[in-house]
Amino acid sequence: MTNRIFLLAIGWVTWAGIATAQPSGGIRKPQIADTIRANVYADNTFQLYLNGELVAVDSIAFIPHNVISVDILPKYPLTIAVLARDNADPQTGMEYANTNIGDAGFILKFSDGTVTNSSWKVKCFSHGPVGGDTRNPRVETTPLPDDWFTVGFDDSDWKNAREYSAQEIDPKQPYYDADFKGAKFIWSDDVRLDNTVVFRHTVARPPDGKDRPDFSNVNNVVPQGPPKGGGRRPPGGRPR
Ligand SMILES: [Ca+2]
Ligand SMILES: [Ca+2]
């Protein structure tokens, strides 16, 4: 009897080991319903990275001001990194043939409840014209670190972003046509002279509390469900 229980136990442990070693069956294929919607508005342009991967670029670098709206497949913790630029000549910090100091602004909302606000980190990498001097315009620029968009980048000594009202930023109509409820416009402390900034923010868990599967490994396993083409192999042929 003792031996039988022992053998049963060995058998179960072996089966469990094989079962967990199988790469298949552990994950289903993600559906479009698993994605969330990202709405982003930048004065004037942006690049959005999630967990170190570029997922969206503003399709209009200058004007008209537009909203970029894309589906994203989130994995939490979700590290967001944004390169945001005001329209500014890199030599003068001004626009419209160096006749004007333009102002900036950035706002983002994901449908999981992620929003921009002063909890986001910010750092300025190009500032000008220094002192607002348009007669002898000078720009102070710091090179972007190679890894500014990565998950592991250390932003602990960066300042918190400053929130701005919609009145201060004066967004154009596309902002009002999209869902930014609960999100705040952000920038660094100087919305006129800080022309290139990076924002970083990590979302530890979905703000809406909804459990979402982690699909980041989906290309390394055989997903659940029937194989493509019903798994039938034509005689002498390759699987379709
Ligand atoms: Ca500016
Ligand atoms: Ca601008």
Image (cartoon, rainbow, N blue to C red):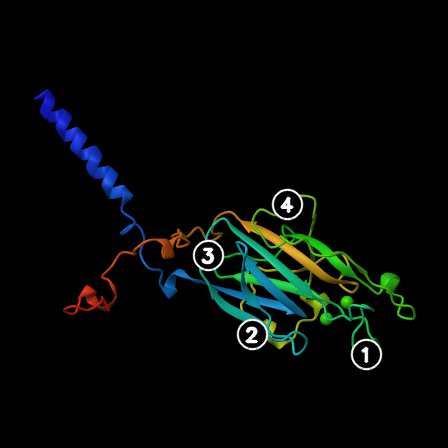
Q: CA distance from mark 2 to mark 3?
A: 24 Å
Q: Is residue 38 left or right of residue 143?
A: left
Residue 193: horizontal and vertical position, in percent? 79, 63
Question: Which residue type carries mark 3?
Answer: Pro
**Residue under numbered circle 1:** 97
Q: Where is mark 3, residue-wise?
A: 74
The residue singled out by tag 4 in the image is 154
- The residue that appears at 28% across and 43% down in the rendered structure is 21
Whole-percent x, y for residue 5 in the image: 12, 26
Which mark is in front, 4 or 3? 4
Q: Mark 1 and mark 3 in contact? Answer it, CB < 8 Å.
A: no
Q: Which residue is mark 2?
A: 177
Q: Ligand 2 sits in which quadrant?
A: bottom right
The kind of residue tagged 2 is: Asp
Amino acid type at mark 4: Asp
Label 1 or label 4, whichever comes before in sequence order: 1
Mark 2 or 3: the one toward you = 3
Secondary element at image label 4:
loop
Q: CA distance from mark 4 to mark 3?
A: 22 Å
Q: Earlier in the sequence, mark 4 or mark 2?
A: 4
| Closer to the eye: label 1 or 2 | 1
Mark linked to residue 223: none
Hey, which residue is sitting farthest left in the picture?
1
Res 130 → quadrant? bottom right
Instruction: Please report contact status of discs 4 and 3: CB closer than 8 Å, yes or no.
Output: no
Say what secondary structure mark 2 lies in.
helix
Tell me the mark number nearer the camera, choosing from 4 and 2. 4
Image position, residue 126 (x, y; %): 76, 60
* Contact? badges 2 and 3 (CB < 8 Å): no
Residue found 76% across the figure and 56% down from its top: 142
Q: Quarter-wise, where is residue 40 in the image?
A: bottom right
